[in-house]
Image (tube, rainbow, N blue to C red):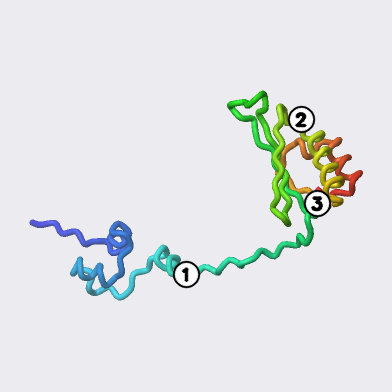
Amino acid sequence: MSCVAAPNPKMLHDRLGHPHLSNLKKMFSELSSIQTLECESCQLGKHVRSTFPKRSQSKCTSIFSVIHSNIWGPSRVSSFGFRYFVTFIDEYSRCTWVYLMKDHSELLSIFTSFLNEIKNQFGQVIKILRSDNAKEYFSSTFSNVLSSHGILH
């Protein structure tokens, strides 16, 4: 008495790295009667992705109209007592300002200083501030400063 196991075509296809059906038929003569092999992974692999636009459709048309900000920290290692930093990035020019902070609560005074620097040095006003959802950006005092200067958050 002998035991013969018929190979499962889908299982063979998967385990051998998704070869074409004609190659499977060459390796396993028992599969010569199969006409098609349905494999979702192979079908998805043949799909063509749409291309990314060469230039983003940014609504930013002048310097300091949109500023991106982020707070990073605390760092495991402090440098002269500074364990945090905040960045301000102008969307139009990609110019970046980095301010070191000893505590994340210094954001309000640093932002006020940055706001004054933009007004005095460049004669510009910030129109929109984009930030992550850090709680420091949503304090009532920070929101009051933004609204008093007409800055959208």
**Type of amino acid under label 3:** Ile
Does residue 21 lie above or below 96 as drawn? below
Among numbered discs 1 and 2, the one appearing first in the sequence: 1
**Residue appearing at x 80%, y 41% in the figure:** 114
Q: Would you name the residue on which mark 1 appears?
A: 47
Crowdedness near tag 3: few (<14), some (14–19) or many (≥20) residues, C-alpha within 10 Å: some
**Residue appearing at x 20%, y 66% in the figure:** 27
**Residue appearing at x 43%, y 69% in the figure:** 46
132 vs 13, nearest the viewer: 132
* Label 3 to label 2: alpha-carbon separation: 21 Å
| Location of residue 28 in the rendering, given as x and y in whole percent from the top left corner | 20, 66
Q: Would you name the residue on which mark 2 appears?
A: 105
Question: In the displayed structure, does residue 4 sit left or right of residue 126?
Answer: left
Q: Secondary structure at mark 3?
A: strand
| Location of residue 61 in the rendering, given as x and y in whole percent from the top left corner | 78, 62
104 vs 28, nearest the viewer: 104
Among numbered discs 1 and 3, the one appearing first in the sequence: 1
The answer to which image quadrant residue 133 occupies is top right
**Residue appearing at x 65%, y 33% in the figure:** 73
Crowdedness near tag 2: few (<14), some (14–19) or many (≥20) residues, C-alpha within 10 Å: few
| Location of residue 105 in the rendering, given as x and y in whole percent from the top left corner | 76, 30
Q: Would you name the residue on which mark 3 appears?
A: 128
